[in-house]
Image (cartoon, grey):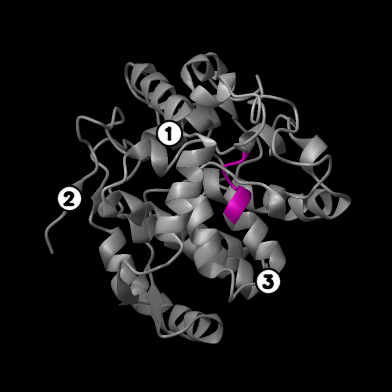
Amino acid sequence: MKKVSDNTQKNPLGSLDEWEDDLLIRYPDPETIAAGRDTEAYRNYETPERDTVKEFYRLQHINQTYDFVLEKKADYLKFDKKEMSVWDAFDFLNQLVDDSDPDTDLDQFQHLLQTSEAIRADGHPDWMVLVGLFHDMGKVLCLFGEPQWAVVGDSYPVGCAFSDKIVFSEFFRDNKDQYDPRYNTKYGVYEPNCGLDHVHMTWGHDEYVYHMMKPYLPEQALYMLRYHSFYPQHRENAYSHLMTPHDHELFKSVALFNPYDLYSKSPVIPDWKKLRPYYEDLVAKYLPSALKF
């Protein structure tokens, strides 16, 4: 299978994982799942550069507008681009090449398998194990031609004022919604405490996989999928004014999941031959034989 790099002129990051590298710098956690590893040693580059990350967020903050999000949802949530078996979908995802990760040479599927195995080892419900396996599946958007800023990055609501708690928030000065009175107030197009299910989030891999998995997984799982990149809320508490008590309760699930997302990578290759029967049964329990993208 031919592999395709996601590093193009419109994409400032050398790979999608550079965004996650920056998360580890911004949000180090001393109680990591990867026991014995100093979080400051994670993704340790000889000369850490954030210029590409800064440029990535400049593009994201300019282009992720309310109209853009509605346009992408109207296009992609028809799920008419491709139909694949679950395992063919992982092969498709593996066409994304990460040439810059200094920690491991594992492919995208093996990274996801490490996350799901860490969750399983801690005795969490099997639907959460499945979340670990699928939480980055939405990165296939890059393989449909979407630029990085429409695939990864911290997520946040559109259609209301951008919080200054969002990383590199100064770049919102070039977003047209910043000057639109429909969208630039605290609540914008929303009502106070309307609930996040009524809020449009930035378009990206988490929003896409959330809608893909919506018919199949419990609500806690869907919160994990949709909000695992919503750092302005679950780390900065910037959007509580849009949330209901139910949202706050379900965000406990997001807090439970996120350490596995950030800190479960290691150079150890999962033994897929031994693990395969378990995951085949797990996928068959919750998902159809083919997924629509």
Sequence-earlier tag: 3 or 1: 1
Kindly identify which residue carries mark 3. 218
**Residue at far front of view:** 181
Position of residue 99 measured from the top left corner of the image (x, y, whole percent): 23, 39
For mark 2, does the 10 Å Cα neighbourhood hold few (<14), some (14 to 19), or many (20 or more) residues? few
For mark 3, does the 10 Å Cα neighbourhood hold few (<14), some (14 to 19), or many (20 or more) residues? few
**Residue at far right of view:** 245
60 part of magenta stretch? no
Position of residue 111 measured from the top left corner of the image (x, y, whole percent): 40, 55
**Residue at point 39% right, 36% down?**
149
- Marks 1 and 2: in contact by CB < 8 Å? no
- Marks 1 and 3: in contact by CB < 8 Å? no
Which secondary structure class fits the magenta region best?
loop
Q: Secondary structure at mark 2?
A: strand
Three-letter amino acid code at the position of disc 3: Pro
Three-letter amino acid code at the position of disc 2: Val
Q: CA distance from mark 3 to mark 1?
A: 28 Å
Q: Is residue 178 above or below residue 261?
A: above
Foreground pick, 85 / 23: 85
Foreground: disc 3 or disc 1: 3
Position of residue 24 measured from the top left corner of the image (x, y, whole percent): 52, 31
Q: CA distance from mark 3 to mark 2?
A: 34 Å
Q: CA distance from mark 2 to mark 1?
A: 19 Å
Kindly identify which residue carries mark 1. 19
Kindly identify which residue carries mark 2. 4
Segment colored magenta: 226-230
Q: Quadrant of the N terminus?
A: bottom left
Position of residue 31 measured from the top left corner of the image (x, y, whole percent): 66, 39
Foreground pick, 141 / 180: 180
Q: Secondary structure at mark 1?
A: helix
**Residue at point 30% right, 70% down?**
82
Sequence-earlier tag: 3 or 2: 2
